[in-house]
């Protein structure tokens, strides 16, 4: 019989165990091993069965066990000590508090998903895991972030695989009372809520859940409340669920509703309103419009408010392809903003921010990434290669500028080491190297022997094999209740065999089935008597992506062939808990996307933190970190005639690497059965990659390169009652009006012989028509360097020219002269041109306005 209603009743803890309540509700437990070990002590079997969820554990354990622990002096002392340590962690100064004056006092971080712990399933893949790791490292470093997301009642989805290999989705509804959440409340105890006006005189309401992520407060907006009409209660039903209008409602709620939630938090607590806002992908871009509306209400014009918002906004793009960007019909956007949603902002002003009104754009389309770039003065991709791809993809927004000058930098993603590093490696670092931090330990030291390292790697692999067997057995039991699992499940995989891992979302570009290109070749590799190989695979396809599901089906069907099934397995329902076993347990982490479609790809980073070696296409993070010792690079067949030929060439390269290099090295053992050459690569990987791949490094970069400069800019435009914003907006309007008449009618040069030599000085004088602009409004530069085909300047350098006083020319009436010199620094082809760009001290880039004039 099914219950007609389900809810969670929280346990009442004995007085001596009240410390467990706070330890369970602050998600620091998800990366703090001693706290996790404390909860495991309560009931190891229940802890594993409940999926390592402290609140679920406390609700599932028998009251008699809690009473028993209440009388256990050692347990009580440990709980109280860990709570005291948590309080110190939450209050003591950390890295951020040691920074010089000028760091932002508060930062708003908006993301559509957050992957923090399996116990809070509010993520679908890499974007959410990255956001969760960002918060964890920000907490460890003391960065004052207020994070904002949505609370999805059914999360993403739970995956199962049908007998014929087809992905099936289920959406188990989450009970907030059984999760580490608290409601933001008014002093009278009523739940705080935000409201948003919608078309047809409707109003969308959302309550605000709070999540403690160490020192970070995460706000999750939830529309499943009685205040909403039935159709609106489902706005936050599923992550990335529903059609275009449903998605738009979620993004309006995240951006506009998220800023309103922060304003309520500031009103009801000691939180400080952010000086800097970080938009993690375009989904949250509407936050800028809410801030503009508030500023207009404070007396600024739209243009002035826009400058304030731009100055303090950082926009991160995660997609390397236009198809990955959310785009909406312009008339749908107009319908939502022709309401009281943001009465201070006109529909035309909104549409202009997201319009694809550039070469190659689509008319009547609203592009969320384009709005993000126009609302953020600072933007970045998530790896060096992705930064280059993004500058190319969005370059049309800054026509006339060299690709390298497009104002999109890159901050390569990182992963939170305490979350993703296996405790066994922590124990080894502590016992042999005296270090409590594996990312900074001296793994080259002889204090840790090859046998020590190899022993830990063997134990990690064995743990993965055991976990895989448990998972497939549990999946069988769920689909075949009362029927015993096949006997061979107990021998699935081998803890002594070279293990390759592959786990990620399953869009087609990630090429889940590239390994199946030549099935006979793959079979021979897996079943080799001398050098056997096994592969563990996991991943979810979007529910609407039937092509991705077909890829999973092909893989599952192959893995279930009688001769293969012991060497290859697809594990259903990939999540954080599975990943924490999978990454450490693999010897090789495989990644074979179509280059350059992997923005970063952090799964291989997590494997590397545990001493796994990578086997990957040179895409995303691997393109900048591969050094020939930390793994293997699969050659990219970029010049192949078509995709089929490319797949064939890259699959053959993959097989060759495994068969002729990877497997022989893995099985080349010394007298202690240790593969010393392999262990040498493990040492190198742990020593060189661990610090660089850490999310601590990533968050420090965001602080130093983006947050602090954004705070400086925000203070500059808001000082003296927004005098800077008013000045900048007026200056931009004046320059933009005059720019069509700015020209460089004449350039003269001299100072070099007819056969110039290295070291000579080229004198350049440019005549520039400014049409009423002053020399202080512009930067006149000589672009110079080597030339290529068609006299194109290759990677030009720029030298500023200075205005020549009293230089109005009779030959070019009204033109101002600018002059300077260029030293010829190298032999070979040389060319130059002169350009004019706007100049203002509050601009972050010469390309910011997208205005440029070249001499012709």
Image (cartoon, helix red, strand yellow):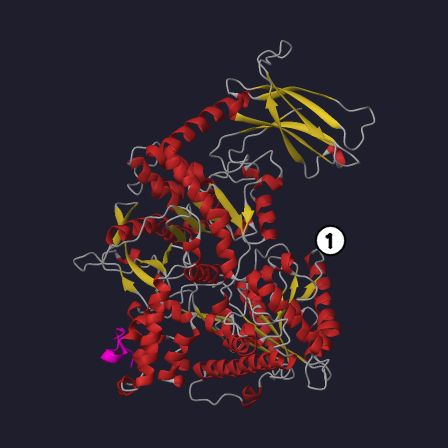
Quarter of the image where one finds residue 34: bottom left
Residue 419 is situated, as x and y percent measured from the top left of the image, at 47, 69
In this rendering, the answer to whether 824 lies above or below 106 is above
Residue 52 visible in image: no
104 vs 500, nearest the viewer = 104
Q: What range of the chain is rendered magenta?
A: 1-18
508 vs 440, nearest the viewer = 440
In this rendering, the answer to whether 469 lies above or below 310 is below
Would residue 16 be counted in the magenta stretch?
yes
In this rendering, the answer to whether 761 lies above or below 529 is above
Q: Quadrant of the N terminus?
A: bottom left
In the rendered structure, the answer to whether residue 196 lies left or right of residue 329 reads left
Describe the element under mark 1 as helix, strand or loop: loop
Would residue 782 be counted in the magenta stretch?
no
Q: Quadrant of the C terminus?
A: top right
What's the residue at 80%, 28% (across, down)?
756
Residue 684 visible in image: yes
Residue 688 is situated, as x and y percent measured from the top left of the image, at 62, 64
What's the residue at 39%, 43% (across, down)?
288
Quarter of the image where one finds residue 58: bottom left
User: Which residue is situated farthest in the left direction here?
Assistant: 188
Q: Main secondary structure of the magenta part?
A: loop
In the rendered structure, the answer to whether residue 120 lies left or right of residue 699 reads left
In this rendering, the answer to whether 811 lies above or below 505 is above
Mark 1, other Cα within 10 Å: few <14 / some 14–19 / many ≥20: few
What's the residue at 61%, 41% (across, down)?
404
- The residue tagged 1 is 639
Task: Report the label total.
Answer: 1
In the rendered structure, the answer to whether residue 440 lies left or right of residue 444 reads left
User: Which residue is situated farthest in the right direction here?
Assistant: 755
């Amino acid at each position: 019989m099914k219950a007609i209603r389900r809810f969670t009743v929280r346990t009442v803890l004995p007085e001596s165990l009240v410390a467990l309540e706070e330890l369970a509700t602050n998600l620091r437990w998800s990366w703090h091993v001693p706290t996790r070990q404390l909860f495991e002590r309560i009931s190891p079997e229940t802890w594993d069965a409940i999926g390592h969820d402290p609140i679920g554990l406390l609700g599932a354990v028998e009251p008699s066990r809690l009473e028993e622990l209440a009388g256990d002096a050692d347990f009580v002392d440990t709980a109280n000590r860990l709570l005291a340590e948590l309080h110190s962690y939450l209050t003591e100064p950390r890295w951020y508090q040691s920074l010089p004056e000028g760091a932002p006092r508060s930062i708003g971080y908006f993301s559509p998903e957050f992957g923090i712990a399996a116990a809070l399933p509010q993520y679908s893949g890499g974007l959410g895991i990255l956001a969760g790791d960002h918060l964890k490292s920000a907490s460890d470093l003391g960065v004052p972030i207020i994070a904002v997301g949505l609370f999805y009642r059914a999360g993403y989805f739970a995956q199962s695989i049908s007998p014929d290999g087809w992905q099936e989705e289920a959406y188990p509804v989450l009970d907030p009372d059984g999760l580490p959440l608290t409601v933001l409340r008014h002093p009278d105890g009523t739940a705080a809520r935000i409201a948003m006006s919608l078309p047809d005189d409707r109003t969308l309401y959302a309550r605000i859940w709070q999540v403690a992520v160490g020192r970070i407060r995460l706000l999750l907006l939830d529309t499943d409340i009685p205040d909403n009409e039935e159709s609106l209660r489902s706005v936050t039903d599923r992550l990335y669920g529903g059609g275009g209008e449903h998605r738009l409602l979620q993004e309006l709620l995240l951006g506009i509703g998220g800023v309103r939630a922060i304003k309520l938090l500031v009103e009801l607590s000691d939180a400080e309103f952010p000086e800097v806002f970080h938009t993690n992908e375009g989904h949250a871009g509407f936050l800028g419009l809410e801030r503009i509306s508030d500023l207009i209400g404070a007396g600024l014009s739209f243009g002035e408010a826009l400058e304030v918002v731009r100055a303090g906004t950082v926009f991160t793009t995660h997609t390397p392809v236009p198809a990955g960007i959310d785009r909406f019909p312009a008339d749908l956007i107009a319908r939502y903003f022709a309401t009281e949603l943001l009465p201070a902002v006109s529909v035309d002003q909104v549409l202009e921010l997201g319009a694809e009104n550039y070469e190659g754009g689509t008319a009547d389309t609203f592009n969320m990434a384009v709005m993000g770039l126009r609302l953020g003065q600072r933007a970045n991709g998530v790896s060096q290669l992705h930064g280059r791809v993004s500058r190319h993809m969005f370059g049309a927004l800054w026509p006339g500028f060299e690709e390298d000058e497009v104002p999109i930098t890159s901050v390569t993603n990182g992963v939170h080491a305490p979350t993703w590093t296996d405790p066994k490696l922590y124990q080894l670092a502590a016992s042999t190297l005296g270090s409590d931090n594996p990312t900074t330990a001296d793994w080259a030291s002889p204090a840790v022997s090859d046998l020590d390292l190899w022993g830990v790697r063997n134990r990690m692999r064995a743990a993965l094999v055991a976990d895989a067997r448990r998972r497939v057995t549990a999946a069988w039991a769920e689909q075949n209740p009362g029927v015993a699992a096949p006997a061979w499940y107990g021998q699935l995989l081998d803890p002594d065999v070279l293990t390759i891992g592959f786990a990620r979302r399953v869009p087609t570009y990630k090429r889940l089935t590239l390994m199946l290109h030549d099935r006979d070749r793959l079979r021979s590799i897996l079943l080799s008597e001398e050098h056997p190989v096994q592969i563990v695979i996991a991943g979810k396809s979007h529910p609407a992506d039937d092509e991705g599901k077909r890829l999973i089906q092909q893989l599952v069907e192959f893995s279930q062939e009688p001769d293969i099934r012991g060497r290859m397995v697809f594990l259903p329902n990939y999540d954080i808990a599975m990943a924490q076993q999978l990454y450490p347990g693999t010897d090789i982490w495989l990644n074979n996307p179509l280059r350059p479609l992997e923005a970063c790809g952090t799964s291989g980073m997590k494997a590397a933190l545990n001493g796994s070696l990578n086997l990957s296409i040179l895409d995303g993070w691997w393109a900048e970190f591969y050094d020939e010792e930390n793994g293997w690079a699969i050659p990219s067949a970029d010049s192949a005639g078509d995709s089929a030929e490319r797949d064939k060439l890259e699959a053959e390269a993959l097989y060759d690497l495994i068969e002729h290099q990877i497997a022989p090295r893995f099985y080349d053992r010394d007298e202690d059965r240790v593969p010393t050459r392999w262990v040498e690569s493990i040492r190198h990987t742990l020593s060189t990659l661990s610090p660089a791949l850490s999310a601590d490094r990533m968050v420090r970069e965001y602080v130093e390169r983006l947050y602090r400069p954004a705070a400086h800019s925000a203070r500059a435009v808001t000082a003296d009652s927004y005098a800077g914003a008013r000045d900048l907006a007026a200056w931009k309007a004046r320059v933009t009006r005059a720019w069509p008449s700015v020209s460089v009618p004449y350039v003269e040069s001299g100072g070099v012989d007819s056969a110039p030599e290295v070291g000579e000085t080229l004198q350049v004088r440019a005549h520039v028509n400014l049409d009423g602009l002053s020399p202080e409004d512009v930067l006149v530069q000589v672009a110079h360097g080597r030339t290529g085909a068609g006299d194109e300047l290759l990677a030009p350098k720029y030298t500023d020219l200075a205005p020549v006083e009293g230089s109005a020319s009779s030959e070019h009436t009204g033109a101002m002269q600018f002059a300077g010199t260029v030293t010829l620094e190298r032999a070979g082809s040389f060319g130059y041109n002169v350009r004019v760009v706007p100049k203002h001290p509050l601009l972050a880039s010469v390309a910011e306005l997208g205005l440029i004039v070249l001499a012709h």
